[in-house]
Structures are given as structure tokens and as C-alpha cells.
Amino acid sequence: MVRVCSEGEWLVARACAKVNLFLDVVAKREDGYHQLQTIFAPVDYLADTLRVRSGVGFTLSCQTPGVPVDASNLVIRAARLLATRCKIDAGAEFELIKRIPHGGGLGGGSSDAAAALILCNELWGTGLDICELAGLALEVGSDVPYFLYGGVCRGEGRGEELEVLEGIPLPSFAIFIPPWQISTVEAFRHLNPANFNQGGIDAYIADLRSGEIFSSSYNAFEQAVFSFEPRQKDIMQRLRGCGCSVRLSGSGSCCWLLVDEHSLGLEPSLRERIIFPPC
Ligand code: C5P
């Protein structure tokens, strides 16, 4: 759930990252998308900040190098879509502080887009409910609807058929951020149907409910990404060789890992790439 507060004429949202604790690809669909079974979990301690106020047209500023600030940014796409569908003749001026790495499988752009929908819905008083916003969110991207709900969710379809899983005692996990990005489209292209439909999501949810987050987790993208990005294989093998319980998030490159003596005891060159949850 995106949290919103006001600061003078600005509305401000905290757009947190996600990981996929479990991600199975069931099949390739006729529309070109893949049918997924996944478990999303929020990363509360890693978040972008998005601010908006009324503006003329749609503008976005962001100081982080490499972030597009034109109409291709999902923030602008989401805001324009809401304005068009609600027949609103209004503009919006956005400021984005980026902390979630791009191309990491942490859903940064999708989270920003969900935040833009929620902020503009409030700024313009368009009054869409969460289901109506979720319909627009899916037009922006497959992961965007999840960020309207947040929490631990089971996702199917493209990831938009969401069930919030209440009462999960989520153990803390850390995020490993490699110094490269993975293209989602490329990762989908390299999927091997032999890795499809492994099943196990219900057993994984049962494990989660008993506090076991890692042992039955799965990500169908790991082998796909290893096949075209050898550095991903090397780094994950290295982390596993040090005893870390580490799993790819989404289509990578970032991974989530258990906070334990292995991850806490890593040598500095690996440890400095990890964001640990606050104590
Ligand atoms: O929906 P989104 O724009 O994030 O998807 C980017 C690309 O990832 C799609 O064009 C498609 O190639 C692939 N994709 C897929 N199946 C999904 C989600 C994404 O094949 N469930």
C-alpha cells in the first residue's frame, strides 16, 4: 500500500520495492505474455519518494542519472492514463527521488507508477476505487497493480490476479544489488519451457505461514538469466558458496537473502552490495 502525506501544496508518496519470494512461470500465453504464479513481498526499507503538485502539462524531475524524465517514464504514463480515462483537463508536476535500482527485479518503476496513480487520484479528486485503479495499473505494466495493494500477495495471470495473504509472519531478509541490470524482456526470452510449471506455490505458502521463507522458494528466471548473464551465475554461486541462502527477485539482477551469520559475515566487497533491513 502506497502511503501518502501532504507537504504544503505537494502530495508525497513513499513507493517501496518488492521481491518475488516465489516465481513460477506456468505457460506462455497466446497474447505473448506469460502466465505466472508468484508471491510478492514488500521491501519497506527500500523506497523511492514521489511528490506531485498541480502543474501545466505533465513534467517529471529526477536527479538520478539514467532515469528517463520524458513521457516514457511510467510515472508520466500512469498520470496521463488516469487523466484521459477520467476526462480530466489537468496537469501534474512530479519530483522523484530514486533509491530502488533500475533493472533489478525490485519493481521500482512499477511502484512509482502505482504511486502516481494514487497521488493523482487524490490531487484531482477523481475518486477511483482500488479496483478501478488496478485496471489502469495493468495497462501501465504487469507488476503495477500489486503496488496498489502491497503486503504479501499471491499473484497469478500476468501478476495482476492478486490475493492478499493476511497474517504471514514475514522473517526479515536483505537485498543484494549487483552492479549490472537485467532486461525483463531478455529474461522472458531466455526462459526454458523445461523450467515451466514446477508447481509448489501452495506448499510454499504453507511454509511461509510457519515462518519458513527460503527452503521451498523458487524462481524460474534463475536458470534463464544464468544462460545469458554469466556474472549473475558467478555472484550467486559465490554467495551460496559462502553459505548464504539467496534467491533471484523477479527477472533479476537483485536477489533477496536471509539475514543470518553467513550474510552478516560476508567479506566487505560482497557485504557492501547488500542492503540489510533496519534492526
Ligand atoms: O507488463 P510489462 O510491461 O511489465 O512487461 C514487459 C514485458 O515482459 C512484456 O512485453 C513481455 O515481454 C514480458 N512479460 C511476459 N509475461 C508477463 C509479464 C511480462 O511475457 N506476465
Image (cartoon, rainbow, N blue to C red):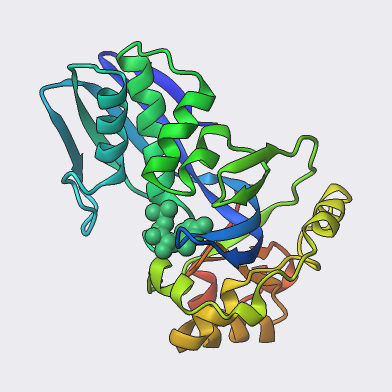
Q: Position of residue 267 (x, y in %)?
A: 57, 79
Residue, x 35% and y 10% (percent of image)? 125
Q: Which quadrant holds the N terminus?
A: top right
Decide if residue 72 is on the left or right side of residue 38: left
Residue in front for this viewpoint, 87 or 91: 87
Total numbered labels placed on residues in the image? 0
Q: Residue at x 53, y 88 (%)?
A: 234
Q: Classify the position of ligand 1 by quadrant: top left, top right, bottom left or bottom right.
A: bottom left
Q: Is residue 37 visible?
A: yes
**Residue 43, position in %: x, y?**
57, 47
In the image, what residue occupies the spot 15% across and 34% down?
Answer: 59
Image coords of residue 231 (percent x, y): 46, 86
The image shows residue 109, relative to residue 190, as above or below, that is above
The quarter holding residue 217 reads bottom right
Quarter of image, res 173:
bottom right
Tell me, yes or no, if residue 101 can be seen here.
no
Residue 73 % position (x, y)? 25, 47
The residue at the point 25 percent across, 18 percent down is 87
**180 is higher (above) or lower (below) than 277:** below
Give the answer, above or below, for where 194 lies relative to 178: below
Q: Would you identify the image quadrant in which residue 242 lies?
A: bottom right
Q: Is residue 89 left or right of residue 129?
A: left
Left or right: 143 with respect to 212? left
